[in-house]
Image (cartoon, grey):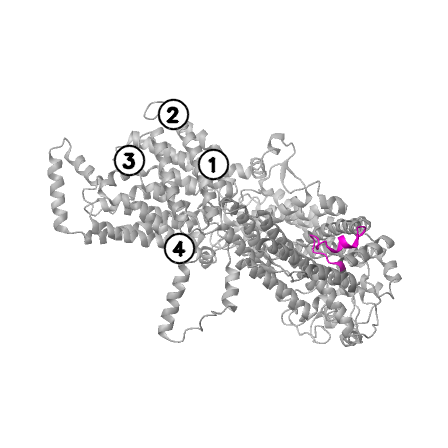
Amino acid sequence: MSDNEKTVPSQADRSPTSTSKDGEQKPARDGKFLDTLPPWIATNLRSKKSWKILARCWLASWLSFLIILPNRPLKAMGNAAFFALMSSFLVPPNMPVQMFVFAISTMIVGMCFGWAIGAAAMKAALSARNQKVLKQTILSVQESAAGAVNPDAQFKLSIFQGAFLDVSSSAVFGVFLGVAVFFFACVRAYAPKLALFAVFGTVVVDIFCAYGPLFPVAQYTIVSSLIISVAVYIAIGIVLILTVFPETMNHAYLASVSAALGNLKSFVELQADIVSTSPGELSVDPNGSLAKMAGLKAAVLAGLQGLEAKSSLINAEFSWGRWNGDDAKDLVEPLKFTASRASGFQSFTRHIIDAEKLSVSRETTKSSDSSPPTQASSQPIDHMGETELIRQLHAHHHRYELQHNTRLSDIMPILERSTADLHRACVEGLAAAQNAIDEINHGRWTRRTPAIADRMSEAEARLDRAIESLRTAVTEFREKKRLEIVAPFIPAVNALKTSTKPLPLRSLVIAYVYCSALVVTSDGVITLLEMISQTAKKRKRSRLWAPSGLRAIGKFILRKGDHGDTEELLGDTRPDNEVEKEEEEKYQRDPDSRPPTNFIQRIADANHRVYQWFKSPEGLFVVKNVVVTIALWLPSVIRSSAYFAYVNKSVWAIIMAQTTLGVYVSDQIFSYVTRLGGTFLGLALGTLGWYVGNGRGNGNGYASAAAFGVLILPIVFVRAFAPPVVVLPVLMFGVTIALIMGYSWIDSHLVVYGSPGIGWHVAWRRFVLVIIGCVASFILMMFPPTSGRKAVRLRNASVVTELGSLYAYLISAWISVEHSAPENDKIDKVTGHDTNGDDAKARGEHGEVEKRGKSWPPQRPKWAQEFRSRIIDLSLQVQTLRGQTALARWEGSVRGVWPKEEYDNLVQTESDMISALAQFAGALIYTDPAWRLRLKKRTKLLNPKFITEVMSLFALVSQALRTGEALHQVLPTALLDSLIYHQQHHRQQYPLGSSTNGNAGGTEQNGDDHGQEDDDVDEEAGVDTLDPAEEIQSEDYMYHAVGVAAVTQILSGLDDLHRTTKRLCGEVPFKGFEDWRNDYEREYSHV
């Protein structure tokens, strides 16, 4: 249910709005009061579409209460009539028709499945009874009731007092209850999309098995009142969702695409403010631009996640409109591509902030250099992990940047000016795409009037203009304006042409990071615009589209990812780790035994796996569900407490214990706080609402309806539009009000056994039951406790492992030309050229490579799509981990303060590394394979020994987080230092002179001196050796340098992960090593 459009309304609302810089749509005249509210409240209050959804949801809840006021429907629905009202809060009609039908279908199927289990339990329990004892008991109860004023009523009262309880019958019910709860708990654990199926099925089984043992004869209709009440709400919901502003999945899907495009446009538009801000101001971020960028990135990822969830159901409905489900789904891949490329802008800001940190560190170093040597030698490595060699390197770059006026602050104005046109065209392209989608999605049922046709034609023309304008801007930037950024560096490169020192190109590389992100994002926008334009021209008129694929529903049900707010509010907040589990199952072996080879070994292995499962978080969750259910069920089948349990509705304590029980301690404690808070407020307002509408009487229908309608309006609004973290207390708020007002009306107008009372009497009983359920689940939570903090640590370990896997994947693509080739292409292993594609045609008869403009944009290699899916999944996992880290603090500080700041640093560093990986992948895609082959041996980052060190550090950090073991002090704290060491070793191994300086092909901070073998590679590759000044002006160098810069940022992030892990897990000391290393570097290390 989180997949509906409830926080970012599209332009299809057709309200007079203007778009602000952060992407929110605002009317021409905004009220100051709305601006002070949270964004999700203000945005929905300004949206016509949100008001339509609110009207539908409010009507559903109000009518569900209104229908129980007359006596005739109340008698037909029975003493569980209030459940219709509860269902309106649990499953509000705030979603498209298809999703609502799916939700209520899972709910009713779950209830019917639970009913079937209960009926089978009753049949088996009656068979287990001793019939002679049963007959004697019945005769005895009838004789004792014969003297009463109303023998039938007395006989029924004896049933609820436990006169017919039987141990064997109760045991059978207990077994069925345990098995059913075990099954439904497994469904909650492994198929979160079926949470409604599991919860409602569990409720029915609880009621059946709590009251079934009391009856001496078959009573298969115990839950009929519950089923009828839910069916009444389903009828209300279906009528309203089909008649009150109905919305198909197709319409909701295109609205989601429009919202995602709007967020992406705002994200790209924000980069103009970033690049116009000085580096010093950006590191302080006085305007909150970095926070806005992070929020917009999260919104884009959430939008893509919502599209993935809806894509499974879009073709399982009848819809009327211009586009069918496949047309809409085809937009997802280019939208993903564009979004992943746009994440490179975040790497640009990271580089600027890191550069400012280096400036601060350099000033600190200068001040420390003036102190006596004895004091300096005792100083440890600073917080940035710098060694003496790295400090010398930064000082060298700083001197040359000052000398040649190539500091970052000098380059930023040039960067802003040269990229302004391309940036403007890119933003306009995204705006044109959003406008076209809105026009396609608007007016589905209206007749195609000339005005509508003209508006659509104008949208298509705007698309064509945007495509042409963006193509022109990209070409102009690649051929002309890009060179304006390089111009300040040409004198410095020419002056240092014969020098063996590294060239001061850091500012150029950082500027290239921004340029590359803008160019590749523009490429994605062009692809997206072309697809929208082609489909819009193909689909001119609206028509009826029939369902085309129902098997996708099964995939939608069985997917564990893309949790909606239903799973969130029911406590299913476990992160997904399917990717990691698949990798582990693929490569991991059992160190204690080989695979089973015979029948006995297979049986033993299966038993071992079952035992291991019971120790897993899912297994413990399931077992705790069963134990707490049986423990709270026992009073209902013990004769001395059966009537007390029935009168006070102890089944609600069972339900509360089951729903508050969580996988992790932190989740469960958070659930307690929110549920108890929502329950308390619901008790207060529910009681107030009852007495306001009825006074001291037994109920006034008109006054109750009016009071209830006013009372639930804000609750329905929050339930329909709030993020999941707010939904849980509001849900308990609404459910408690429904229980108090529903129970009170039923008790005063219907004859029931075990009257709960009205108003205050219902309220305090409800609160006691909630407390009992929470206490019971709390006791089970502690045996054994499953720490959410440990889960956060293990989750970080899995993320680090996946980061290392993606890094290795991209490095493999870099060093393997065949791996980087598009499908059906053949690549020459020596030259790196395509032997049967456009690359072959682009070469002259002498083998020189012509300008790349003729083959722009380059074909995307076959690994790109898999990488894009993996990195988006990892980004979503990091977003989930961020929320789980925030929840973990609810465990308290019993054993000591939990270092939340360190784990927040881990998550932030992982997020930055993901952006760098996306930037790295884009650079690999856009760099000519011949260039990569030519520079493979010159690029120090590809030194095999250095690659080994990097992958080892990934593994060590992940292993330390997974096991909690301390890392050794001698491990490298700065991978850049190791990189320089390998460079010096390379020079010693290849002492021959070089034909060119080679600095342009080096890392962001360093150049490369290379030997004669590089010249041989140049000749074999068919690429002329370029002068350094010419080389840095090459477009291929831009992508190559950006790729190297991205790898450098990844390595910097890995160093940060390493240092943070040391602070978390500890460090094994090596006495005297720190001082010796500092002395050694000062004496022997020179740049």
**Residue type, numbered disc 1:** Val
Q: Which residue is mark 3?
A: 75
Residue 210 lies in the magenta stretch: no
| Location of residue 643 in the rendering, given as x and y in whole percent from the top left corner | 24, 38
What mark, if any, has residue 716 been given in the picture? 1
What residue sits 35% from the left and 73% below the top?
600
State yes or no: discs 1 and 3 in contact (Cβ < 8 Å). Answer: no
Q: Is residue 603 above or below residue 94?
A: below
Label 1 vs label 3: CA separation?
27 Å
Crowd band around label 4 with a 10 angstrom C-alpha radius: few (<14), some (14–19), many (20+): some
Secondary-structure class at tag 3: helix
Residue 34 in sight from this viewpoint: yes
Secondary-structure class at tag 1: helix
Q: Is residue 249 above or below residue 1074?
A: above
Which one is closest to the eye, mark 3 or mark 4?
4
What mark, if any, has residue 186 been given in the picture? 4
| Location of residue 569 in the rendering, given as x and y in whole percent from the top left corner | 46, 45
Secondary-structure class at tag 2: helix
Which one is closest to the eye, mark 3 or mark 2?
2
Task: Give the mark, 3 or 2, whose residue is nearer the N terminus.
Answer: 3
State which region is magenta.
369-388
State yes or no: discs 4 and 1 in contact (Cβ < 8 Å). Answer: no
Closest to the observer, 822 or 991: 991
State yes or no: discs 3 and 4 in contact (Cβ < 8 Å). Answer: no
Residue reaching furthest to the top: 696
The chief SS type of the magenta part is loop
What residue sits 29% from the left and 43% below the top?
224
